[in-house]
């Protein structure tokens, strides 16, 4: 059924580093709320939420997944997201749709690289945060060390609201700092007990820190608190939700998703203290208009995720911002201006769906099947005039070339790729007309691996990854002249063309053709044919079949035959002369250069600069836009950095990022040129066999 009202909805996105246990936590919440009849297991390949073949195979989430539960009279929309860098786009989409980002942190490993990266993104998105320290029952788990690491990284707003009772396999309950009660769990259920003596001091200290930060959201109470008055239990509980929504308090919860310890307590606190949709503030349109989360308004909704299934069709995940939505209504896509009819509204748990029997209201999340043209980032509304600001999607910088395995696959490849890219804004596709390759860009090699697997699993399209062709160029470095003479006699009219060409580098750039014929040595009607023959030869190059650039060519002499000369003969003569002249003009290969702006923590600056020098990169500047970070500006050969994304990730332990743009060409060093020519000759020899 639909949610009873906006005030009874909680949208919570689970984010964090891979293998922290986000999906396991969601599975435990589904089970404990009786939404699912069994506890799903990622390790056993029986997860409700990680149901795709590649997710089962790799044992980690690839897609954003919904886990809506009804608990304590409240609709909790849990959004489970991937924790690996190649799929961070779905984590961002999940944060866009939620009012609370619950960071799941491994009690053994502590906060890790992706935790930091997503925390910074949450800062920019101004979304409230909480932390769930998971796996407290595991060997080497440490609550105190994990909390210390969290506070060191993210500040003193990070405050435990629970303290564990027992350690490792003896973890048996929690001290509730909010209510100053202790709860232990056994086979008979949960029991309220006195706070253990050894935890009283730590509990009181945590309570004081919680009251300190919570009081900051109310000026009058803050003054009373500073004057020595303690917050009452009622005041603390009343203000805590406001403090969490405002980001003054980042509460830390604890437990074990696998044993389900602490998970039911967490759900209770989600209902009590996590922000409602309208506590997050209004959504902003691209024109700066504020759209509040209210039911009594025109319908508007944001498509934050799209899934394409070859059997079910397109599924659109929509966060309802204002008004309400019901089956049978018509909405307008602001991007296309076209109407979309809502025939069904679904509640989805993993791959299992159920028809919603009531309208969905502002703040809720629904899934709409078979919308004709709606894509991720589209805005739907009654009037079609609302357009929300798009998601801050990271730019895909890892390109690969794909070819169909068979002719039958080739016929289906284009439509299958389009469906995949419509689903995921972190993928892009282009047809490179110069290299004649279909180039797909993703966030990394794993994203491409999953793409290829999905093409096969979903669409039965088999593809092969082939080496990406770098768009090299050729040019000349000296002045040279040569004759091109074409004479052919085979009965009847023959062919005769004769021209002398002078070629040289063109400092102004581009191709320039000069007609220096005097005295009618070559009739005027054949001059354009010579120009055309030169252009055709330049397209195929003379060293390694790359296009030639920045050359000036003059035709200054030649001869003709009154009967046998024609345009074709002079085109052929021009090709002969041009190739011969190039051989004497020091032909060279030019490589495309990439401008990179690499953003990294200070401690990795030396390693990145050293790495760049090893791949012929030149550091042209650096600055420090934020404390502890550096931006290094580099010019490097594109061939050396075309797949730099996983390499930088390795050097910086996942903390580095960059933007890349192509600008200009430079001469390839002789050693690299010899390799390129050798590779070209090997391919040509192979193709002639």
Image (cartoon, grey):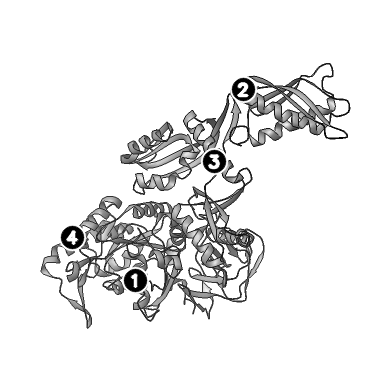
Give the labeled residue for mark 1: 272
Q: Nearer the viewer, residue 52 or 230?
A: 52
- Mark 1 surroundings within 10 Å by alpha-carbon count, few (fewer than 14), some (14 through 19), many (20 or more): some
Disc on the earlier residue, 4 or 2: 4
- Camera sees residue 303: no
User: Could you give the CA–CA distance between mark 3 and mark 1, rounded to whole angstroms?
Assistant: 69 Å
Label 3: state its secondary structure.
helix
- Left or right of 574 in this view: 110: left
User: Could you give the CA–CA distance between mark 3 and mark 2, rounded to whole angstroms?
Assistant: 24 Å
- Camera sees residue 436: yes
Question: Viewer-nearest of labels 3 and 2?
Answer: 3
User: Could you give the CA–CA distance between mark 4 and mark 2, rounded to whole angstroms?
Assistant: 83 Å
Asked if the residue under mark 1 is in contact with the one under mark 2, i.e. CB atoms within 8 Å, the reply is no
Asked if the residue under mark 2 is in contact with the one under mark 3, i.e. CB atoms within 8 Å, the reply is no
Label 2: state its secondary structure.
helix
Label 4: state its secondary structure.
helix
For residue 682, which numbered disc appears in the image? 3
Disc on the earlier residue, 3 or 2: 2
504 vs 596: above or below: above
Give the labeled residue for mark 2: 584
The percent position of residue 537, horizontal first and vertical second, equals 68, 33
Asked if the residue under mark 1 is in contact with the one under mark 3, i.e. CB atoms within 8 Å, the reply is no
Give the labeled residue for mark 4: 205
Q: Nearer the viewer, residue 147 or 381?
A: 147
- Mark 4 surroundings within 10 Å by alpha-carbon count, few (fewer than 14), some (14 through 19), many (20 or more): few
Disc on the earlier residue, 3 or 1: 1
User: Could you give the CA–CA distance between mark 4 and mark 3, rounded to whole angstroms?
Assistant: 72 Å
Disc on the earlier residue, 1 or 4: 4
User: Could you give the CA–CA distance between mark 2 and mark 1, rounded to whole angstroms?
Assistant: 82 Å
């Amino acid at each position: 059924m639909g949610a009873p009202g906006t005030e009874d909805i909680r949208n919570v996105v689970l984010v964090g580093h891979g293998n922290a246990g986000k999906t396991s936590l969601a599975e435990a919440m589904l089970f404990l709320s009786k939404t699912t009849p069994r506890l799903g297991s990622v390790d056993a390949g029986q997860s409700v939420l990680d149901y795709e073949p590649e997710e089962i195979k790799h044992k980690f989430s690839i897609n954003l997944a919904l886990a809506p539960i009804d608990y304590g009279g409240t609709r909790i929309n849990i959004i489970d997201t991937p924790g690996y860098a190649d799929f961070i786009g779905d984590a961002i989409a999940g944060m866009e749709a939620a009012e609370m980002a619950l960071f799941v942190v491994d009690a053994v490993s502590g906060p890790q690289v992706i935790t930091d990266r997503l925390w910074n993104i949450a800062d920019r998105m101004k979304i409230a945060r909480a932390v769930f320290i998971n796996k407290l029952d595991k060997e080497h788990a440490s609550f105190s060390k994990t909390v210390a690491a969290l506070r060191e990284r993210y500040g003193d707003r990070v405050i435990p609201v629970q303290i564990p009772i027992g350690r490792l396999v003896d973890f048996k309950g929690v001290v509730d700092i909010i209510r100053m009660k202790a709860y232990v769990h056994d086979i008979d259920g949960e029991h309220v007990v006195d706070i253990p003596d050894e935890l009283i001091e730590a509990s009181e200290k945590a309570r004081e820190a919680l009251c300190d930060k919570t009081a900051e959201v109310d000026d009058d109470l803050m003054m009373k608190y500073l004057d020595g008055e303690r917050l009452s239990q009622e005041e603390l509980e009343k203000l805590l939700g406001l403090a969490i929504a405002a980001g003054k308090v980042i509460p830390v919860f604890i437990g074990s998703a696998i044993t389900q310890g602490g998970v039911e307590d967490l759900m209770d606190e989600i209902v009590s203290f996590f922000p409602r949709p309208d506590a997050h503030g209004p959504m902003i349109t691209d024109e700066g208009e504020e759209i509040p989360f209210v039911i009594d308004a025109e319908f508007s909704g944001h498509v934050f995720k799209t899934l394409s299934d070859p059997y079910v069709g397109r599924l659109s995940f929509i966060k309802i911002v204002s008004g309400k939505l019901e089956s049978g209504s018509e909405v307008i896509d602001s991007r296309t201006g076209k109407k979309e009819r809502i025939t069904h509204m679904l509640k989805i748990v993993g791959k299992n769906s159920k028809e919603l029997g009531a309208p969905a209201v502002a703040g809720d999340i629904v899934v709409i099947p078979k919308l004709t043209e709606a894509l991720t980032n589209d805005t739907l509304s009654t009037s079609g005039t609302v357009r929300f600001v798009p998601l801050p999607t990271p730019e895909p910088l890892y390109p690969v070339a794909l070819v169909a395995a068979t002719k039958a696959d080739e016929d289906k490849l284009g439509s299958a790729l389009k469906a995949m890219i419509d689903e995921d804004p972190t993928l892009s596709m282009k047809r490179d007309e110069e290299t004649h390759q279909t180039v797909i860009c993703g966030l990394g090699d794993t994203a491409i691996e999953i793409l290829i697997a999905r093409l096969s699993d979903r669409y039965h399209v088999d593809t092969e990854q082939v080496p990406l062709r770098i768009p090299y160029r050729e040019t000349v470095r000296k002045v040279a002249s040569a004759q091109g003479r074409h004479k052919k006699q085979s009965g009847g009219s023959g062919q005769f063309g004769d021209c002398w060409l002078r070629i040289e580098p063109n400092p102004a750039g581009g191709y320039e053709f000069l007609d220096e014929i005097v005295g009618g040595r070559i009739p005027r009607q054949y001059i354009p044919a010579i120009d055309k023959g030169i252009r055709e030869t330049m397209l195929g190059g003379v060293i390694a079949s790359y296009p030639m650039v920045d050359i000036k060519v003059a035709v200054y002499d030649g001869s003709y035959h009154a009967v046998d000369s024609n345009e074709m003969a002079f085109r052929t003569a021009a090709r002969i002369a041009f190739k011969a002249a190039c051989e004497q003009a020091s032909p060279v290969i030019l490589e495309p250069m990439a401008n990179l702006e690499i953003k990294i923590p200070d401690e990795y600056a030396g390693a990145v600069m050293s790495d760049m020098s090893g791949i012929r990169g030149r550091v042209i500047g650096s600055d420090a836009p934020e404390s502890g970070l550096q931006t290094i500006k580099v010019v490097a050969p594109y061939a050396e950095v075309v797949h730099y994304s996983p390499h930088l990730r390795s050097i910086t332990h996942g903390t580095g990022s960059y933007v890349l743009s192509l600008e200009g060409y430079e001469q390839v060093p002789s050693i690299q040129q010899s390799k390129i020519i050798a590779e070209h000759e090997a391919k040509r020899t192979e193709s002639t066999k």
